Image: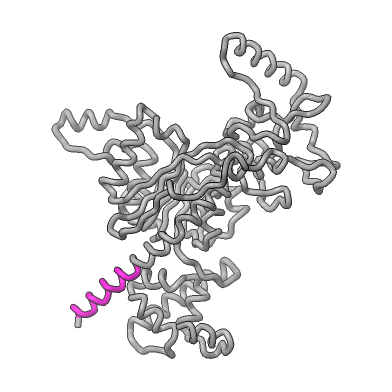
């Protein structure tokens, strides 16, 4: 196999038709094995051989020709991927950046918010349109089947309280119910339906830290029970603070799941995380006066635009508000930060007054972060460049970044998961190949 790969690079004419089509389609041998129902050994043999005349080979070539044509037309490039994944509750693509970085191919995206879809579409090349409300795909088996097959599912799903009304009704009728019954009416129930229907090898979920304590712990117990007992996945979870990677205290829970039948292990507690005490400070994300190129409307004439400085009226209100609550022993109010600090959590409400993260200014009222600084604070950008496109208003940008996942944190988790993902995908491919071979033998 290695000899053939080397020689095909030196003498391209030696490369088989099947090998060329795999390259053009962006499908790895492992994924080809899974999607075509052919053993991995046969896929490798077809890559090396001239042109087998079997019906299975001809059908495979036809399929790859169709796929490769679409891939080339849409992406304008040829690329091999190691696995496929879907991006649910996608927001502006924090997980997309992470799983693209480990050579995953996103085959389906869902995000209900129109403005977030606009930002997503402005930043990622996709061979598929971004779907809206995921509930449009969980109505029945026919709608579920519209979601492409995938190896990995990623989702930053919303946390909603689980109603016990449906459970009480079933109890009164003497009917049994399971965890999935408990979650009906929530978006987690839709997520569970997709997992149950498509059986991805691996998934990664993200939520706020308080998911564990929500409703006295009942919500998390129900989620965990659904994933483990009803859907058949081994679960690992860990609360991780983003300030290991960015100057922001932002704790989130990450939950991984691996199909029990694949015997693949991912334990997030064993993942190495950079020391939070050595994490970056705000000077790594703030605009650098006189050193950055202008970026209207955020940074003009070598300094942050005046509109981000609080008005005298708003600054006076925030100070009095804080004094009033301090007198009552409450900690409500604004928070001021210098360049050597680590900020509080950026929230989706930052657009209202910016009070949770205000940057101190000499001889002036403090200022909000600009949307570009928020992009850096969430790891979508760095000071060395403004590659992330922000096509929406400041209000929408603040909401979107405040709802997102910290990108370098997500990338670290994705990289840690990749060996298990590859192993799981390989096992799925081998099982499909064995099943296909068995069917062929029975037919013979």
- Magenta region, residue range: 429-443
Q: How is the image coloured?
A: one colour
Q: Position of residue 380 (x, y in %)?
A: 62, 48
Residue 65: x and y in percent read 47, 77
- Taking the spot 58% from the left edge, 60% from the top edge, the residue there is 125
Q: Does residue 420 show up?
A: yes
Front residue (pair 57, 234): 234
Left or right of residue 335: residue 136 = left
Where is residue 150? Give x, y as percent: 40, 60
Is 170 left or right of 152, judged from the image as shown? left
Instruction: Please name the predominant secondary structure of the magenta segment in the image.
Output: helix
Residue drawn at x 70%, y 32% as measured from the top left: 368
* Relative vertical location of residue 266 with respect to residue 367 in this rendering, above or below: below
Is 430 included in the stretch rendered in magenta? Answer: yes
Left/right of residue 120 with respect to residue 186 in the rendered view: right
Residue 117 seen in the figure: no
């Amino acid at each position: 196999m290695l000899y053939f790969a080397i020689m095909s690079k030196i003498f391209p004419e030696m490369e088989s038709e099947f090998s060329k089509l795999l390259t053009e389609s962006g499908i790895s041998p492992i994924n080809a094995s899974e999607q075509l129902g052919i053993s991995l050994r046969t896929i490798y043999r077809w890559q090396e051989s001239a042109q087998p005349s079997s019906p299975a080979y001809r059908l495979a070539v036809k399929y790859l020709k169709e796929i490769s044509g679409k891939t080339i037309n849409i992406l304008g490039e040829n690329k091999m991927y190691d696995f496929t994944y879907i991006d649910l509750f996608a927001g502006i693509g924090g997980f997309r950046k992470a799983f693209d970085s480990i050579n995953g191919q996103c085959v389906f995206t869902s995000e209900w918010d129109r403005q977030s879809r606009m930002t997503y579409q402005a930043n990622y090349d996709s061979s598929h349109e971004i779907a809206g409300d995921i509930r449009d795909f969980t109505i029945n088996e026919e709608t579920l089947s519209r979601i492409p097959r995938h190896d990995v599912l990623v989702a930053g799903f919303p946390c909603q309280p689980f109603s016990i009304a449906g459970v009480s009704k079933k109890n009164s009728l003497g009917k049994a119910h399971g965890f999935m019954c408990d979650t009906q009416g929530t978006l987690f129930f839709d997520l569970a339906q997709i997992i149950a229907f498509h059986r991805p090898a691996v998934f990664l979920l993200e939520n706020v830290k308080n998911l564990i304590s929500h409703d006295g712990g009942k919500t998390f117990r129900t989620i965990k029970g659904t994933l483990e007992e009803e859907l058949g996945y081994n679960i690992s979870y860990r609360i991780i603070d983003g300030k290991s990677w960015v100057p922001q205290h932002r704790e989130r829970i990450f939950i991984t799941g691996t199909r029990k039948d694949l015997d693949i292990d991912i334990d997030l507690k064993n993942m190495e995380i950079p020391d939070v005490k050595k994490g970056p400070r705000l000077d790594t994300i703030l605009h650098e006066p006189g050193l950055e190129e202008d970026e209207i409307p955020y940074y003009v004439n070598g300094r942050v635009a005046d509109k981000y400085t609080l008005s005298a009226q708003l600054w006076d209100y925030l100070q009095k508000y804080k004094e009033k609550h301090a007198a009552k022993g409450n900690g409500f109010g604004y928070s001021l930060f210098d360049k050597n600090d680590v900020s509080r959590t950026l929230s989706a409400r930052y657009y209202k007054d910016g009070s949770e993260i205000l940057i101190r200014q000499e001889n002036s009222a403090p200022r909000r972060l600009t949307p570009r600084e928020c992009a850096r604070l969430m790891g979508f950008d760095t000071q060395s460049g403004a590659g992330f496109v922000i096509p929406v208003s400041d209000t929408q940008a603040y909401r979107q970044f405040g709802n997102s996942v910290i990108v370098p944190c997500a990338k670290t988790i994705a990289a840690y998961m990749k060996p298990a993902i590859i192993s799981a995908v390989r096992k799925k491919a081998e099982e499909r190949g064995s099943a296909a071979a068995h069917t062929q033998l029975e037919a013979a």
